[in-house]
Image (cartoon, grey):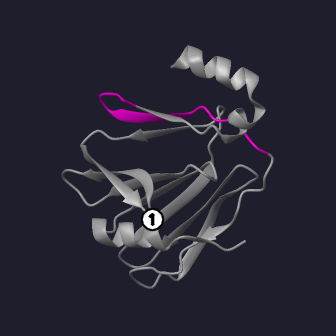
Amino acid sequence: MVLCSGVFFATSENARADFSERFRIFYQYSVLYRFANESDNKALPVYDFPWLPAEFPDKSTNTDSDTKRGFTLKNDSNYIMFSYYKMSSVSKLVLYTAGYSHEEVYINGMKGDFYTQKHGSESELVWFDESAAICFLIYSDLDRDALIRTAESIQAVG
């Protein structure tokens, strides 16, 4: 497959532009996501949550660049750390998953992975918009259903 796809991509510029591939490698204490698609020059959209399970009065920006954005929401009892970035061959994501269980999920038809602590309340949800070549990540202490519903509500706002 790799050799065939290399020949295919060498002869087809459209194939290279449309190719979006990611690799997930599980290690003893972590999981690594690597991406093989070409980077584009499109601006990274701005995403936000139209629905949240509770009031979150504090919103602080963690990152805001051409390739990655993110923010943190906090209230008296919960937090949500949300980030997203362009998937390209120069980007990778490492999640430290020691003591976490794993479940494959779909967020609005997009494939993802849900990791939750076996003895605790923290979870990580990562999913991929293959058509836009964007990887989303939420780290939170919300329960599974609230976290997935929050992720399903995410929309581009700019």
Quadrant of the image occupied by residue 143: bottom left
Left/right of residue 119 with respect to residue 149 in the rendered view: left
Q: Residue at x 69, y 25 (%)?
A: 9
Pick whichever, 143 or 2, lies toward us: 2
Left/right of residue 64 with respect to residue 56 in the rendered view: right
Work out which quarter of the rendered image holds the C terminus and state it: bottom right
Q: Which residue is drawn at 44% across and 60% down?
A: 109
> Which residue, as the protein is rendered here, is positioned at the far top?
3
State yes or no: residue 31 in magenta. yes
Q: Which residue is drawn at 46% across and 53% down?
A: 127
Pick whichever, 132 or 151, lies toward us: 132
Quadrant of the image occupied by residue 64: bottom right
Q: What residue is disc 1 on?
A: 108
Q: What element carries label 1?
A: loop
**Residue 29 in picture, x, y percent from top left:** 32, 32
State yes or no: residue 38 in magenta. yes
Q: Is residue 47 above or below residue 116?
A: below
Left/right of residue 140 with respect to residue 116 in the rendered view: right
Q: In this view, does 121 lie above or below 50?
A: above
Q: Residue at x 44, y 52 (%)?
A: 126
Is residue 143 among what the camera can see?
no
**Residue 131 in picture, x, y percent from top left:** 61, 52
What residue range appears in magenta?
Answer: 25-40
How many badges with numbers are in the image?
Answer: 1
The amino acid on which the numbered mark 1 sits, given as a three-letter code, is: Asn
Left/right of residue 45 with respect to residue 32 in the rendered view: right
Is residue 134 among what the camera can see?
yes
**Residue 129 in picture, x, y percent from top left:** 55, 53
Q: How crowded is mark 1: few (under 14 residues within 10 Å), some or many (20 or more)?
A: some
**Residue 74 in picture, x, y percent from top left:** 47, 73
Q: In this view, does 151 lie above or below 1?
A: below
Pick whichever, 76 or 3, lies toward us: 3
